[in-house]
């Protein structure tokens, strides 16, 4: 999907949103809040007190104990998309923002308390997905010369490093808690599947073999589990992850092995684009949708 089309769809979706949590071991789902607009992609803060999400180009913090919502001041960045992550200590927020002028997504960093974003990726489009455990490096999906691949870049400045270079779409890169691996999703095996590689891009290994299109692997804080979104085979093109589809949340051991469905819902794009594990490595936050009449 081209960037302009994605940007338009994010603004035009006519849906109710349910911010939910899920106990991955019991299957218990809890609806925290229902919104009359589209919200997307919750991040859970390290202290377990807040969920950070985007809506209509802006960033918000939802306090779980009180249900109080506050807007995070992002300065000029008022066209944020659903690819945002928190620093390992949750002191900073990294966002992907469609910049004025060329409407291309670039990555910025600002204090979680709010502030003026600092540009990290001059090249565009760039869609953020991962922050290294030592806080030094960001991982993202980017289109360069007509191909989407996985890249990393130093937080404090420097050149980006290309980690993948195969035909097809590579997306959703996320560091393991130990920092030695990067998980991602790729169409290199035809269907979109979950893969893992070393932090420098070497030794790629396919981790799922589902009869589905699998997106956005998220590693639990304890490093034991990986959750992801699965589209039914035939519902979507393997390289597409649209909204308003019947999808499943699935869980697998990070060492590899059998996967299992832990929830079924109406969602897709915006449901769980970024890591949404609670600090307890037991609960996930996600967004489900309901179309307006």
Image: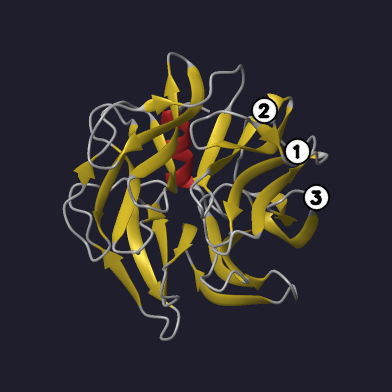
Q: Which residue is mark 2?
A: 187
Number of the front mark, 2 or 3: 3
Separation of marks 3 and 1 at Cα, in angstroms: 25 Å
- In the rendered image, residue 48, in percent from the top left (x then y), is placed at 45, 75
- In the rendered image, residue 177, in percent from the top left (x then y), is placed at 51, 55
Q: Quadrant of residue 92?
A: bottom left
- In the rendered image, residue 175, in percent from the top left (x then y), is placed at 50, 47
- In the rendered image, residue 195, in percent from the top left (x then y), is placed at 66, 37
Q: Earlier in the sequence, mark 2 or mark 1?
A: 2
Separation of marks 2 and 1 at Cα, in angstroms: 15 Å
Number of the front mark, 3 or 1: 3
| Numbered tag placed on residue 235 in the rendering | 1
Q: Which residue is mark 3?
A: 257
Q: How many marks?
A: 3
Q: Is residue 247 visible?
A: yes
Please say if 232 is above or below 24: above
Please say if 292 is above or below 187: below
């Amino acid at each position: 999907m081209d960037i302009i089309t994605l940007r338009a769809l994010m603004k035009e979706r006519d849906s109710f949103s349910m911010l939910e949590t899920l106990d991955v071991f019991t299957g218990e789902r809890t609806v925290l809040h229902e919104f009359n607009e589209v919200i997307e992609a919750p991040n859970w803060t390290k202290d377990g007190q807040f969920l950070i999400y985007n809506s209509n180009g802006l960033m918000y913090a939802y306090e779980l104990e009180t249900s109080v919502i506050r807007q995070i001041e992002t300065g000029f960045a008022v066209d944020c998309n659903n690819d945002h992550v928190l620093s390992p200590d949750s002191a900073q927020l990294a966002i992907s923002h469609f910049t004025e002028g060329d409407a291309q997504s670039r990555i910025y960093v600002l204090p979680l308390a709010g502030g003026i974003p600092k540009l990290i990726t001059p090249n565009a489009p760039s869609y953020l997905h991962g922050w290294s455990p030592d806080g030094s490096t960001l991982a993202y999906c980017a289109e360069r010369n007509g191909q989407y691949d996985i890249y990393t870049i130093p937080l404090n400045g420097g050149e980006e490093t290309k980690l993948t270079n195969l035909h097809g779409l590579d997306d959703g890169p996320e560091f393991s808690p130990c920092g030695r691996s990067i998980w991602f999703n790729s169409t290199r095996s035809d269907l979109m599947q979950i893969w893992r590689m070393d932090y420098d891009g070497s030794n790629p290994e396919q981790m799922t073999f589902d009869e589905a299109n699998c997106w956005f692997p998220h590693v639990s804080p304890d490093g034991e589990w990986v959750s992801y979104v699965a589209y039914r085979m035939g519902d979507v093109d393997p390289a597409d992850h649209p909204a308003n589809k019947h999808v499943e949340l699935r869980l697998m051991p990070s060492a590899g092995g059998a996967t299992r469905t832990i929830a079924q819902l109406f969602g897709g794009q915006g449901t769980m684009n970024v890591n949404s594990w609670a600090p307890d490595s037991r609960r996930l936050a996600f967004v489900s949708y309901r179309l307006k009449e």
